[in-house]
Amino acid sequence: MKLEGKVALVTGSSQGIGQAIAVRLAQEGADIIIDYRSHQEGAQETLSKVESTGRSGLIVKADLGVVSEVRQLIQSGIQHFGKLDILVNNAGIEKNASFWDVTEADYDAVLNVNLKGVFFATQTFVQHLIETKRTGKIINISSVHEELPFPHFTSYCASKGGVKMMTRNLAIELGPLGITINNVAPGAIETPINTRLLNDPEKLGALLKNIPLGRLGQSQDVASLVSFLASPDADYVTGSTFFVDGGLLWNYQEQ
Ligand code: BGC
């Protein structure tokens, strides 16, 4: 087990990729802080799965788009487990609209959760590591769309492009503190964020033609890479993005 004695926070871990990451890190020996915003039963399910590995979990409700809640989330986790070693910034949302129809409220919702939340969760975590004079690992769940245009999802792309530059920048600032930061960039993974696409056979067919490995990804495909980046095996890895996309990045059209 690679993460024995570690404590990890996985934001947005009541479903999808976040849930799989929480369970995988627990299987590797970490205790887990499970965060959710609205899907409480999902958070309970994650907790049961974490506990069935023999590790402990703590459920905390927090909206990653609200900085005071982000800080509260991290403080509650530290209070409960005594420390935090690994931060996985997974929570994310997307809104589909033509650029000229995007509302300010939708723009704010996406940027607040996907970029501002990541920024201040990371800052609060780093402050804790500095205070306790320890090193740590940050893994951001970005997207192929930190790199690849995605028409009708401009706010989402802007947020993920922001996370890409944040990671590159922080690798330099945090390196001297022994803190690493990396992005994992999933492609089309079968999760609730994709429900509309999954239920549209025509779009799904077109998408699959763009994926060299010929299938959608599963949450576990992402979780296994996160568990590596969170472990000492990845001590010399920082400032990079790792794509988990079945090869989709080569050239892509969903609509
Ligand atoms: C988005 C999905 C999309 C996938 C591939 C992800 O980042 O959340 O909606 O299907 O990228 O384009």
Image: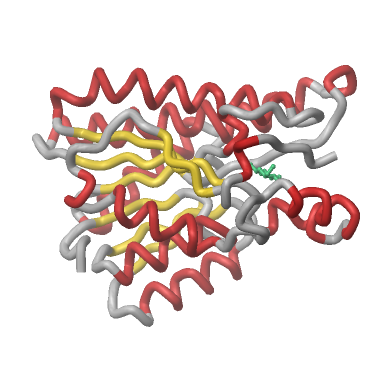
Q: Quadrant of residue 167?
A: top left
Left or right of residue 33: residue 17 = right
Q: Is residue 187 visible?
A: yes
Q: How many marks?
A: 0
Outermost front residue: 212
Query: Up-down: is 69 above or below 156?
Result: below
What is the image's colouring? secondary structure
Quarter holding the N terminus is bottom left
Could you say where residue 156 lies in the image, as x and y percent from the top left? Answer: 67, 30
Closer to the camera, 110 or 153? 153
Residue at figure coordinates x 58%, y 35% from the top left: 113
Query: Up-down: is 100 above or below 12?
Result: above
Could you say where residue 207 lies in the image, as x and y percent from the top left? Answer: 77, 49
Quarter holding the C terminus is top right
Outermost left residue: 133
Q: Quadrant of residue 190?
A: bottom right
Closer to the camera, 95 or 108? 95
Left or right of residue 125: residue 49 = right
Residue at figure coordinates x 76%, y 51% from the top left: 209
> Ligand 1: which quarter?
top right
Closer to the camera, 143 or 210? 210
Residue at figure coordinates x 9%, y 35% from the top left: 133
Residue at figure coordinates x 44%, y 76% from the top left: 49
Query: Up-down: is 100 above or below 232?
Result: above
Q: Quadrant of residue 213?
A: bottom right
Q: Is residue 196 visible?
A: no
Could you say where residue 38 lies in the image, as x and y percent from the top left? Answer: 64, 55
Could you say where residue 202 lies in the image, as x and y percent from the top left? Answer: 90, 54
